[in-house]
Amino acid sequence: MNSRIVIKVGSLAITDETGGVSPSKVQALVTELQSLKALGVVPILVSSGAINSGRGFIQRPEEKKMMISFQQASAAVGQPLLMKAYIDALSASGAHCAQILVTHEDFKDRKRFLNIRNTINRLLANDVLPIVNENDTVSFAEITVGDNDQLAVMITEATDSEKLVLLTEADGLFNKNPKELDAQRFDEVDFKDDFSGVRFAAKTSVGRGGMDTKLKAVRKLTPLGVDVIIGTFLVESPITRLLERRGGTLFKGNPEKQTSRRKCWLSTIVKNDAWVVVDDGCVKALSDKNTSLLPIGIKKVHGLFRRGDVIQVKNKNKTVAIGISEFDYREMELIKGKKSLDISELIEHAPSKVAIHKDNLLLKTDFR
Ligand code: GLU
């Protein structure tokens, strides 16, 4: 049987360190993706590299606040150059690829989410390679996916893929910086493992992710029953090598697969950098009485989020639940610690009296 696998490549796997697409790296990747078909693998590619491919064409600003438009413009130049390299690489065999550009908003809106899924299904049925990236040109702080490790998580869930392969420089997870001589690689990690005792190596200067964002990706998918493999792209046929378990780290998915589509959707679109901190009484009410999250129990608001985003609920530095926020981060800041009855005085046309409705809340025990 054919098995769908999402493969995510970081910027340096397909572009040069100094900027610009590397046609030879893209060709090698495409040739390998095509050869995977013989192994019964149906690949879906999440490709970074737009910003790095285009940045040489846009003058780098001196001011920090101009960096966003620099990156947006670089991506606008780089994304078509990247696709051209993929198209050229596929053309020798007469194969085709498709470009899918998305932001976080497209996943939280159920209709758009289903459209992404239907489009990818149709492409695969026509033997076209889907290539997904964030739409960096239109995305900004409040709507960005953030990094492509997270994007790959959402694509894996949306497409019912059975595995996610994250290609990076390091050959998997090590107990310390892999450049240190006595660093040891973990070959296989159980889905319950909390990765304590692991020190992360610094991320590369190109691209947004690092080992930290990769492990966040692992934590979201493995509880649902999806395997994640992290390994290096710096070898011949890196994907085949990882699928044949000749290196990298395999993070085993929960043998009991999560079957609720809604739970899978909520727990993969949750924002990494958005949460509220709640008091102990609130945690007790959520877990014992199955209540909604009320503003009175909220002590702190962190990160940028919009109404309808899935955010984390934390207590003592631990995520105790996730859920769809009824308010944006500015409104949440205004109502935190307040009684539900006071909300209408603080926010005009307040959409709700609760911060997260119980129907839209998943306790940690529900998704792990
Ligand atoms: N979307 C960005 C790009 O294509 C990369 C994001 C990431 O590296 O995680 O350049």
Image: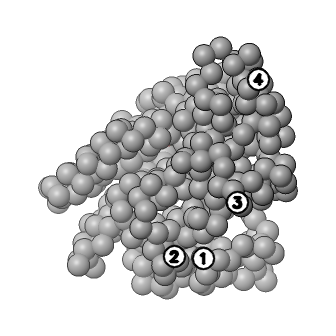
- Compared with residue 236, is residue 28 higher up or lower down, i.e. above or below? above
Residue 313 is situated, as x and y percent measured from the top left of the image, at 71, 49
Residue linked to disc 1: 191
> What residue did someone put label 2 on?
253
Mark 3 sits on what residue? Answer: 287
Which badge, 4 or 1, comes first in the chain's sequence?
1
Q: Give me the C-alpha separation between circle 3 and circle 1.
A: 23 Å
Graded by Cα atoms within 10 Å as few (under 14), some (14 to 19) or many (20 or more), the crowding at tag 4 reads: few
- SS assignment at label 4: helix
Q: Which residue is pictured at 42% across the width and 79% down the height?
A: 243
Give me the residue at 72% from left, 40% from top: 294
Q: Are marks 3 and 4 in contact (CB under 8 Å)?
A: no
Tag 1: amino acid: Phe
Q: Nearer the viewer, residue 297 or 194?
A: 297
Which mark's residue is nearer the viewer, 3 or 1? 3
The reply to whether dot 1 and dot 2 touch (C-beta < 8 Å) is yes
Residue in front for this viewpoint, 17 or 182:
182
Q: Nearer the viewer, mark 4 or mark 2?
A: 4
Name the spot of residue 4 as percent of width and height, x first: 32, 67
Q: Is residue 178 above or below residue 311?
A: below
Q: Quadrant of the N terminus?
A: bottom left
